Image (cartoon, rainbow, N blue to C red):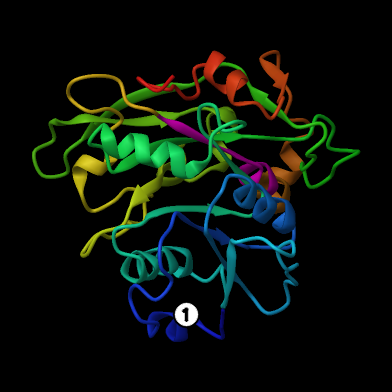
Amino acid sequence: MDFDSLDQFANATPGQFGKGPAALVIAEDRVEVASTIEHVHSLGFRHIFVLAPPEIELRPLPAGTKTQLHVIRARSRAPGAAQAAVNQLIEKMPGQWLHYCYNGEYLFYPFCEDRSVGEMVTWVLEERRTAILTYVVDLYAPNLRTYPDAVSLDNAMLDSSGYYAEARPDEETGHPKERQLNFYGGLRWRFEEHVAKPKRKIDRVGLFQAKPGLRLREDHTLSDEEMNTYACPWHHSLTAAICSFRVAKALRTNPGSRHDISDFRWHRSTPFHWSSLQLMELGLMEPGQWF
């Protein structure tokens, strides 16, 4: 089902898309749009929504698949467009699990090579959790002369260390929020002089259960504070990672940073194996009690 605008999508009837889980891919440019859609499709999402301007061509899903592709034609880079699309999707699919990402981003969760996203969220619900905290792990090409846009699926690299967390203060009281932290690292940390302070965090509530009244905020947190926590009160909770070329692309596109950065590699760079086990071993996500 296609929509000619966000307004037309907003007029869709809540519940008309049926059961999830569903993924929303926000296509900001043409880079790796197809591979991002293919990746979420491989994880077992029943619906894939793509927010993209008309000039970005999209391939149909493979014949015979049960997954449905829905295209929303709009200026995806317009201020607030991505946030508006997520919030409208929350309204359209109450009670269903939703994931959102940008093109060139790839969701990984523990054991995703063998277990579907549906299996994972079913288990998370049994743990009385309705949201999964995800860490955005920056990917980048090893050689910017060979890959001037910093994107290479076959030779992707990531930082194996340099990640840290700080207490997240309550805006009203100034006291730290319970079980909430701001996480930092990757390219946003190493090249922070080129990244606006509000955009340096790498945490995102990237997979959650929609419910009436829930809203995604500009800082990638949700209006329900419990859904922003990294764990429940009684034990460690499952977390996931979104492996992303988005920051690397931005640093190569921005005129200031493009000429200041000749290489993203440093002594803690390591090849990305496209493996959930590697991400768990690096401490970039954890299975909680799921084995």
**Residue in the image at 64% along x and 46% along y:** 42
The residues colored magenta run 239-249
Quadrant in which the N terminus is drawn? bottom right
Please determine whether, in this image, residue 26 is positioned above or below residue 12.
Answer: above
Q: Which residue is mark 1?
A: 6
**Residue in the image at 79% along x and 47% along y:** 149
Quadrant in which the C terminus is drawn? top left
Q: Residue furthest left?
A: 173
Q: Residue furthest right?
A: 146
**Residue in the image at 32% along x and 26% along y:** 237
Image-based side of 148 in relation to 160, left or right:
right
Does dot 1 land on a helix, a strand or a loop?
Answer: helix
Which corner quadrant of the image does residue 83 belong to?
A: bottom left
Q: Disc 1 marks which amino acid?
A: Leu
Image-based side of 230 in relation to 251, left or right:
left
Residue 172 x %, y %: 10, 44
**Residue in the image at 43% along x and 37% along y:** 120
Residue 53 x %, y %: 64, 75
Please determine whether, in this image, residue 36 is positioned above or below residue 240.
Answer: below
Image-based side of 59 in relation to 166, left or right:
right
Image-based side of 148 in relation to 26, left or right:
right
The residue lying toward the viewer, choosing from 129 and 173, is 129
Which corner quadrant of the image does residue 164 belong to?
A: top left
